[in-house]
Image: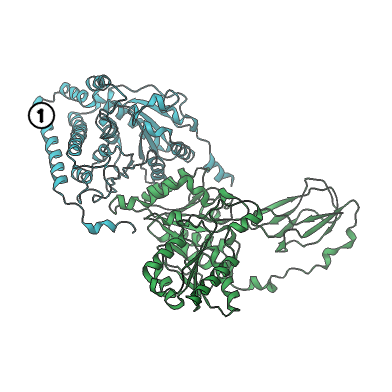
Amino acid sequence: MSKSKKNILSKPILRRKKPINIIKKNSEINILNKEHLIKLYQEMLLIRRFEEKAGQLYGMGSIGGFCHLYIGQEAVVVGMQSVSKEGDSVITSYRDHGHMLACGMDPKGVMAELTGREGGYSKGKGGSMHMFSKDKNFYGGHGIVGAQVPIGVGLAFSHKYKNDGFVCMTYLGDGAVNQGQVYESFNMSALWNLPVIFIIENNKYGMGTSVDRASAGSSLADRGKAYGIPGVEVDGMNVFSVREAGKEALDFTRSGKGPYILEMKTYRYRGHSMSDPAKYRTRTEVDAVRQQKDCIENLKEVLQENKVTDQELKNIDSEIKSLVTNASDFALESKLPDENELLTDIYL
Amino acid sequence: MTNVKMPALSPTMTSGTLAKWLVKEGDNIKSGDIIAEIETDKATMELESIDEGIVNKILFKEGEQNIEVGTVIAKIGDDDQSDDKIISNLPSINKDENPILNKNTITVREALRDAMAEEMRLDHNIFVMGEEVAEYQGAYKVTQGLLEEFGEKRVIDTPITEQGFAGLGVGAAFGGLKPIIEFMTFNFSMQAIDQIINSAAKTLYMSGGQMGCPIVFRGPNGAASRVAAQHSQCFASWYAHCPGLKVVSPWSASDAKGLLKSSIRDPNPVIFLENELLYGEKFEVNEIDDLIPLGKANILRKGNDITIVAFSIMVGKALEVAETLSNENISCEVIDLRTIKPLDIDLIINSIKKTNNLVVCEEGFPFAGISSEIISQVQELAFDWLDSPIKRITGLDVPLPYAENLEKLALPQANDIVEGVLSTLNRSAKE
């Protein structure tokens, strides 16, 4: 009994008293070859162009309901997924299209789900916020702010239970960090040393409320401190910083030391959803980030420094463009779901 | 001389077992000394003496069962009068002579535990998680012995964090495991209802059939005894309302076992509603290993004049009423729903075609309840077979009061069913 008590109730060790400062090092650049760099660029550009197209289709009425675009934040998910292992599970909230693409899901299936067609990942029954791919270990796409966090901890629990060596990457926004269930999740994951990384995508606004008006304390990376969970602030606009922090977190967690928090300082260029006029911030603020910190433009410069020619960049652009056009064509040509689908998939 | 009486040590305790005496006649005890161990319906508790003095008489032997609350079990006085030796005149307990122990009986509590244990032996992906399920052996002793057999990896005590561990369970189910999540009572499931409805019930549909959620949420539901409004509520209609969930609510021990086993094997999220007052009830069991399919109701008593539909604790009351009314030459057919959703409406309709009258019983609130649903379906499907308007016997539309008399008034009693049956048959005869 004493043994079991020790294992179950052992106090989490405070692993790092002070979170280290924002990681901005670009040491990653030196260890990545040209192909790696191009791959990162392609993935980020795919998300950017895909989301722009989704915005267009929304404007044309082909996509309905809620549609939350990821534009601006691409470095976070691309950086993190580029250092994860195949088999690691991923779960996020409703700003999720970028995560699906970064997990390797087919842009056609994602776009067709946005247009509510039978070719969509959920056969048109889930929409923008509810898409899943067990093949790609992507567990959604959840519409309730914060609700994906305990589920992510549950996925981590299953990794530990099966002893499969995988980690659950649980993404949440700065808007979710004040939900009670996030702390219930921090507590359980630390208590049981579960392999989960909480990636807080702090894009500065939870819908229209800035993080300063919503969250007490100076750092979201510190939010796990009471549970002994190490936390780091990361420049989420820089894919190399994301990769470096991601590697460190993954090494820590995969070696059985328990959860880890990464606060990704990022920014979304578009409104919260398509119907958001974004009156809570100025155009100047958005433009400043776009001009100075854009993750794709910055990476483009690095590519150019690494002798990627303008012609190569042009070729990449047109490849991505045609991928997105194909996805969009597929999504518009795919049929509406058969009416017989209405009452399927309620029970197994 | 002071009398030491069998204490009530839990809200539902009506009698207890004298597990052990820690004092003997002639001992001088002080206030606060532990004098005995009493086994209640939930746990073994220590009995402290309030009084000081010498133990004069011990009136029950160790091991004596079913000593009613309030019975004098020992006498404490100022002087040593232990020479009365009343204890030596008591008959010794002979288990072979106890009729209830001789039959093949099992409590609902044991049936539930056995169901989990048997399934856990078959499938290593099944685990049990909840508050006090492991080291404490279950707040209501339902998970007794599971930690010992299956270890801490599979029987897991959680912090008090319902939304968190319900969500964790859902994630584990998505990840390929088969969680059994215990709510200490379903009242606390309201903390977790978003995870149950939005995450567990809807994901299969939202994923176009890709991601099922094989999970069981179980625990006691409905009114217990004198625990008042926040701890006394039936959640059958809450959960049955939502597509994607199955809702099960057994009455007997063999149903509890067979239905829980089926629920654990079911690939869908199942809400398994138990009843605290039934945990200690003993039932005869015939086939130990029977799986009982979900979605199948059961005719517990055949009859011709009226059909009484009930589930969970109301089944016992319905059977009692049927027995009473048989003396008045009224023949009641009693149906135990067993599963609320999917509802076995065919069985109910077939019964109505024979009896032409229906009374539906449920302990929960009347508005938008399970009885309302049954009545609605019956009038859609069997209107022409009815000789009288359908009557529902339910709890009142009020938060459950604490006071004993008010609590009883708020909950449906056997007598309410009798009146319901009589008024229904009365109208049936007139019209």
Which residue appears farthest toward the bottom when viewing the image?
Answer: B329
Q: Give x and y (percent) for residue A44.
A: 21, 32
Q: Residue at x 59, y 44 (%)?
A: A2
Picture mark count: 1
Which residue appears farthest toward the front when viewing the image?
Answer: B430
Against A137, residue A304 (above or below) is above
Neighbour class for label 1 at 10 Å: few (<14), some, many (≥20)?
few
Please say whether residue B122 is visible from this viewpoint: no
- In the figure, the shade used to draw chain A is cyan
The residue to which callout 1 is attached is: A314
Q: Secondary structure at mark 1?
A: helix
Q: In this rendering, would B264 be left or right of A279?
A: right
Quadrant for the C terminus of chain A in the image:
bottom left
For the residue pair A86 and A107, the one nearer the viewer reads as A107
Residue type highlighted by circle 1? Lys
Against B166, residue A146 (above or below) is above
For the residue pair B356 and A271, the one nearer the viewer reads as B356
Q: Residue at x 53, y 36 (%)?
A: A11
For the residue pair B350 and B217, the one nearer the viewer reads as B350
Q: Give x and y (percent) for residue B280.
A: 61, 62
Q: How is the image coloured?
A: by chain
Please say whether residue B139 is visible from this viewpoint: yes
Against A337, residue A54 (above or below) is above
Q: In this rendering, would B135 be left or right of A340?
A: right
Q: Give x and y (percent) for residue B356.
A: 45, 75
Which lettered chain is shown in green?
B
Q: Give x and y (percent) for residue B346.
A: 39, 71
| Chain label for disc 1 | A
Q: Residue at x 46, y 46 (%)?
A: B192
